[in-house]
Amino acid sequence: MPSVSPSAKTLPLAGIRVLNLGWVWAGPVVGQTLAFLGAEVIKVESRTRFDLLRTLPPFAEGIVDPDRCLFNHAAWAGNGSITLDLRQAEAIELVGRLAALSDVVVENFGPGVMERFGLSYDVLRALKQDIILFSMPAAGLDGPLKDVRTYGLSLASLTGLDSLTGYKGGGPVPMENAFCDPFAGIFGAFGVLTALHHRRRTGEGQHVEFSQQEAAMQMIAPAFMDYTLNGRVAEPCGNEHPTRAAAPHAVFRCRGEDRWISIAVSSDEEWAGLVAAMEGPSWMREPAFATAGARLEHIDALHERLGAWTTAFDDRELAEHLQRHGVAAAPVLNVADLLHDPHYRARGTFIEVRHPLGFRETIYGSYVKMSRSTPQVCPGPSMGQDNDYVFRELLGLSEARYRDLIERKVIY
Amino acid sequence: MSGVAGRGGALSGVRVVDFGQMVSGPWCAKLFADYGADVIKVELPGGDAARRAGPFPGDKPHPEKSGLFFAHNTNKRGVVCDVTQEAGRELFLRLAAKADLLIENNLPPRTRAWKLRYEDVAVVNPDIVMVSITPFGQSGPYSDWNACDLNAFHLSGAGSRYCGRPGEMPLEHGTFSADYFGGAAGAAWGFAAFFGRHLVGGGQHVDVSCAEAIAATFIGGQNIGGYAQDGRFDRRTGVGMSQAAPATILPCRDGHVWMLTIEQGQWQGLCRAMGNPEWASLEMFNDRQVRAENADILYPFIREWTMQHDKMEIMEKCQAEGCPITAVYTVEEVARQPHLAERGYFATIDHSELGPVRTLGAPFRLPASPGGPNRAAPLLGEHNDEVWGELLGLSASERAHLRAQRII
């Protein structure tokens, strides 16, 4: 299978096969995570309705084509692709036959969609007794909000997370892309693995229910506990510490257009480092800033004073200067910085690869480093790139049958 | 073994040592504890820094009453070990020798100073998977920097690209979102490394940088290919999605709503929900593209309607018309959300110092092997005797000796 490299044998999930019906972002990232770790992942999609993600710009060499979507090449890397029109009964039968050869089926449709396809857990289990069905609907498979319509972008509104994001004293400011999608995708891979482990121990498969709302809600624990313990309802607080345990704790303006530095001081030792780095201006010795408690109490004034100082400096030079004094500080990077930053270059975060269609492009590589296993990352799949392998080799369809299915656009 | 481990969760039989503080490492280890692994949390004598970070009842600091510590350490056993002393370090390694995974989030210079790098741990346990979750990772020029969640988040590009108003400071969500992201990556990759260790020839070191995980999978996905190809990139707008409108958070009578329509049918649904106002049929709002171009004109019109209605009412009306429009739930509103209550998401656990504590439940459901928090976070050193005595076989007098040396 072209999307899986020969070195996959040395990866820890070698031998696991995943049939991925997930679409857009979160579902494909579950597949990607498992594939980076060695699983063979077969994504099912169709030309009858292009996956939304394949339609988003930018495109390779500016040519609009679902096989040239750069977002897709990065976010779906590791997934293979077969094309099936799931509205046709023969396509569903092929999915079932493929499920019978798989360890895991992943889907992120709404509740009831798999049933309507005729691919419920009971059906799949009849085809393969120990199958793991991994469902990741927005808000779970039951409950009054189970059919809630959201996109990844707005899902965070159902978790409390959006209500915490914004400037101090103002209303919520949106996170302008679906942070919860890649989060749920990676987190979901852990969910799949727990079920695989259970299967190894007991021989049992199961239907895992991964509500993206409930998974993403894990991130509001600090504010939730303040509500639990004190009845306090958190509001946006800029970049302040989530439990108000550090000051300063913010992003400050630096020299140049849209240049910023993040600075956090959690201990007296770090405060002393900051004082030394700033060569001890007199205001830092005022009682208002003398203790951690006082600094928290006067955090707005503290941030204002500090911001007046940082604005004269280059963000990177200032971060290095502060680091020499033991202060937690780092430049705030923009998209262009990511590609050139020496840290990400040293870690090989972004890699240039050749796409089978002939162009070179930049995607992200293995963003976690393992000392024994190195995933070989190739661009996300062209539509149907694995049709031959899956339908002829894996399912053993005759040449005539395969051609017929293509002609009748069952495989499409 | 006591507690959840005896209940037969999906991960029963897996032993994890949690040598982390604050959020990323402890939360990652908690995911294992939620599903039945035997997770032993090792703290220095001063305790996990989360014990000092609150929130505390009545804002009165107390090392056994931190909400942050409670939330991320349920279902774990807790021991103390001063690894800065040689005998403590040896004891820690004896425990690591009995573990399948070691999850930690100490900054690399600290791990080096303690001589508890992966190389040191692998000597006593070549099969162990050591998961290190730090802001910047174990290699690269910033790996020795002092840093926390905030620095990691903003090194990822997420704030600059996607959160905040132009010209004003980029924002993180008001939580430890980089730590959680790194924690999830550590759980998935670390557990895979454990699951397949027989295939790859043993344990290994799994190096997670919270900044890198977000930079790659969240920002890199949609932005890096285009920038590398065209030399152009976008920045935050403060509004929402710029290719569609409405696609923003708007105020309403009692709070805020996520006002979003992508497909034309959703826009029409919103128009119906608003009672088909005359302005909605203006040419400048005809399709998604022109609406996006005229967003500045569109939003005040919609706001006029939202300001007359409550968030739940807007959500119900719009959802009924097929629109992906949702209330921006406050923490209190999610805590009381009937949906989550009916699903039994929350768990209430008794704690000897805090009394009954309501906390977030299992992040996902495994019907064949249910998980979730059911045992309070450990008091500092609560399971010293159980772990050092029963698991490592130290006699009462050996333990007394270690106590006298302030190692445990």
Image (spheres, rainbow, N blue to C red):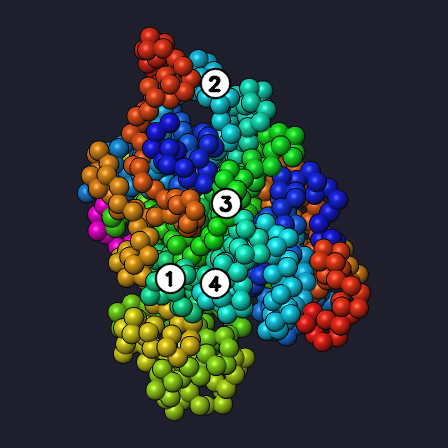
The reply to whether residue A159 is visible in this rendering is yes
- Magenta range: A229-234
Q: Earlier in the sequence, mark 4 or mark 1?
A: 1
As helix, strand or loop, the secondary structure at mark 3 comes to: loop
Q: In the image, what residue type sits under mark 1?
A: Asp
Q: Are marks 1 and 3 in contact (CB under 8 Å)?
A: no
Find the distance from the CA under tag 2 to the CA under tag 4.
45 Å
Left or right, B4 with reference to A298: right
Residue A152: mark: 4
Residue position marked by numbered label 1 in the rendering: A142
Front-lying residue, B73 or A129? A129
Q: In the image, what residue type sits under mark 2?
A: Arg
Find the distance from the CA under tag 4 to the CA under tag 1.
19 Å
Q: Are marks 1 and 2 in contact (CB under 8 Å)?
A: no
Instruction: Give how far across and how far down residue A279 sits, in percent.
Output: 43, 35
Q: Kindly indicate whether the residues beneath marks 2 and 4 are on one polypeptide chain.
A: no
As helix, strand or loop, the secondary structure at mark 2 comes to: helix
Instruction: Give how far across and how far down residue B197 sits, in percent.
Output: 60, 33
* Host chain of mark 2: B
As helix, strand or loop, the secondary structure at mark 4 comes to: helix
Residue position marked by numbered label 2 in the rendering: B94
Q: Are marks 4 and 3 in contact (CB under 8 Å)?
A: no
Q: Earlier in the sequence, mark 4 or mark 3?
A: 4
Q: In the image, what residue type sits under mark 4?
A: Gly
* Host chain of mark 3: A
Residue at the image point whose x is 60% and y is 67% from the top = A92
Residue position marked by numbered label 3 in the rendering: A204
